[in-house]
Amino acid sequence: MAAKRFLTLDIGASTLKLAEFTSTGNDDLTLVNFGKTSLELDPSSEEDRNPFIVAALRKLIAGRQFRSHRVGISVSSQQVLTKFMKLPATDESKIRQMVRYEAAQTVPFPMEEVVWDYQVVGLKGESDLEVMLVAIKNDIIEGFNGCVEDVGLSVEVADVSPVAVYNAILYNCDVDQGCTLLLDIGARTTNLIFLEPNKVFSRNIPIAGNTVTQNVAQEFEISFAEAENLKVSRGFVGLGGAYEEPEDETAAKLSKIIRNVMTRLHAEVARSINFYKAQQHGTPPQRLLLAGGTSITTYADHFFKEKMEIDVQYFNPFHNVSIQVPPEELEKVAHSMGEVVGLGLRMVTECPIEINLVPPTVTRRRQFMRKIPFFAVSMIGILCIVMSWWLYFWRVTDLLTNHRDQVAREVNDLQQVESKLKAAESDDANIKMQVRQIQKVIWMRYFWLEFLDDFNQQIPKDIWITQLTPQRAGSPLSYSGAAPAAGSSSGGGRSRLRGGPAPGMGPPGMMPPDGFDGGPAAPTEPAAASKSDAAAASKGITEFEIRGLCLNDRRSAEPLKPVEDFQKKLEHSRYFKEVEILESISPAPTDWTFTFRLKAKLKDPILY
């Protein structure tokens, strides 16, 4: 599947952040390009911001070479009216009517002059709904849309900064346990977002980075731009208390200014938490996430951790986002990119909160563009109906003829293949029969030599074997033309076995090939072969009865130990598994030898 490519743009109070993502449509998100630039605008100036936005956008697009023209935008919370309201649970069709009525009472402008949207964000009690209302003036959102279209881009989604960040948090963080508070410290405002399972609340505070810069400019009697550079290059949050101040007087003074502003911000955060608990019936935050450009001021995290006594972390909006850009560049701005990630999610998947403040001009243009394909399709459809019948009859005849010829060729090819397969199967059966016969001859030649040699190696030096009788299920076997062999000892050394089972026996544990009956076998069908295997298995040797003499060691307290050792050695040999002493007569002190009798069961039957 081809990757979907699009842009996301966050229009902040003092900066623009533009990112390019790709997605394959499986809720995945990959960052392939990004850029951040300042608007170079004094916040105290009353100049129109739109020309600065257009200039900054052109600079970003030219410098970073973005390829897509589809874009989702987010606007800062200070330009948007956000209100959380409680409505009675009712049909979805009636909720919009009630929200519009509440919006008309809340928004300080005529409803025709604003773009508004809402989202049900949770339940409040058992019968009430928690609804989030967002509204923005037409001229503001139209101005942003004009800026975007001036640089050749097309707006598809218009979101609000806190909502975009909220969606990014849910995509990258686990917020199922307790309450999480996000503190997004921007340039003009600080956004607070409370997150709990099935609950969200947002609020903005007019204390942020520009507040610090303005205080620095007043205290040092310098311009706003100089104060901003001083804050960024040398600023940090004073630790206060028992911590020693820096030796540099400027740094010490700067740290106190920043700490004072942060203290004011913390007081507002504390009031917001109390409001959230009292009015929204929320729980106190258990974790604080920091985001925004001012949040990376040195020791800011330490300050809030000391004041709030909860876990403080920096929010990473790219935790679950694939990265195809240099990580070292992204690390410098990642803390302020939550909005572009949230917008990216809006472009590819369904998000928990979907607010869309698309300008009316874009909405009307989309509605018209949606109708154009229907007109075109209608005209083309009429022409296609006329042509299709003529093409149908001509084409069907041609297809059937070609198909018939193709099937005939395939049938002929398959018949030739079938003949070759039958001949090959016949040759294969003959070869397998010959291989089985050769294998049997080889087994017959070497097996008994190896079996008797292994058996001979297990005999202790003080034992002579006098008789070795093959048995099946406890009964001795008899053979035509050969009888069970008996061996006798001589000379006081290890005995040598003479004779053995009749010729034609195969190795234990291995069934003879199909058709083997002690001599060359003729080819057989599979059913006949299985019957032959069953018949061969019924003739197997399952055990041996072993009779012998053992030299009596008159000095030993255990005269039967050689027989017991012989029993254990046989049990650990490669052919036997259970060896039982059937008879072992304890010798008198005057006897030189005594007799014994063993039953040794084979691990696998010897087939013959």
Image: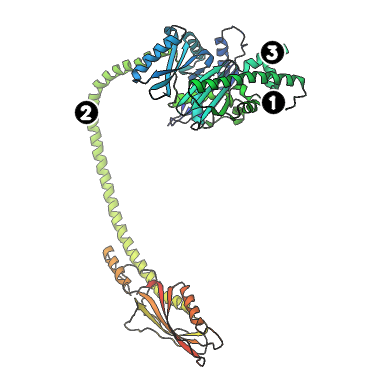
- Pick whichever, 361 or 309, lies toward us: 309
Q: Earlier in the sequence, mark 1 or mark 2?
A: 1
Tell me: 148 left or right of 332.
left
Q: Secondary structure at mark 1?
A: loop
Dot 1 corresponds to which residue?
239
Q: Mark 3, mark 1: which one is toward the viewer?
A: 1
Residue 374 position, x and y percent, is 32, 17
Quarter the C terminus occupies: bottom left
- Pick whichever, 494 or 265, lies toward us: 265
Residue 523 position, x and y percent, is 29, 67
The residue depicted at 49 percent of the width and 22 percent of the height is 201
Q: Residues within 10 Å of mark 2 (few under 14, many from 20)?
A: few
The residue depicted at 35 percent of the width and 20 percent of the height is 90
Q: Secondary structure at mark 2?
A: helix
The residue depicted at 32 percent of the width and 64 percent of the height is 430
Q: Does residue 16 sit above or below 173 in this rendering? A: above
Q: Mark 3, mark 2: which one is toward the viewer?
A: 3
Q: Amino acid at mark 2?
A: Phe
Tell me: 162 left or right of 246.
left
Dot 2 corresponds to which residue?
393
Where residue 258 sits, quadrant-wise, is top right
Compute the Cα span from label 3 to label 1.
22 Å
Residue 228 position, x and y percent, is 67, 16
Q: Amino acid at mark 1?
A: Leu
Compute the Cα span from label 1 to label 2.
88 Å
Residue 217: which numbered mark, if any? 3
Q: Earlier in the sequence, mark 3 or mark 2?
A: 3
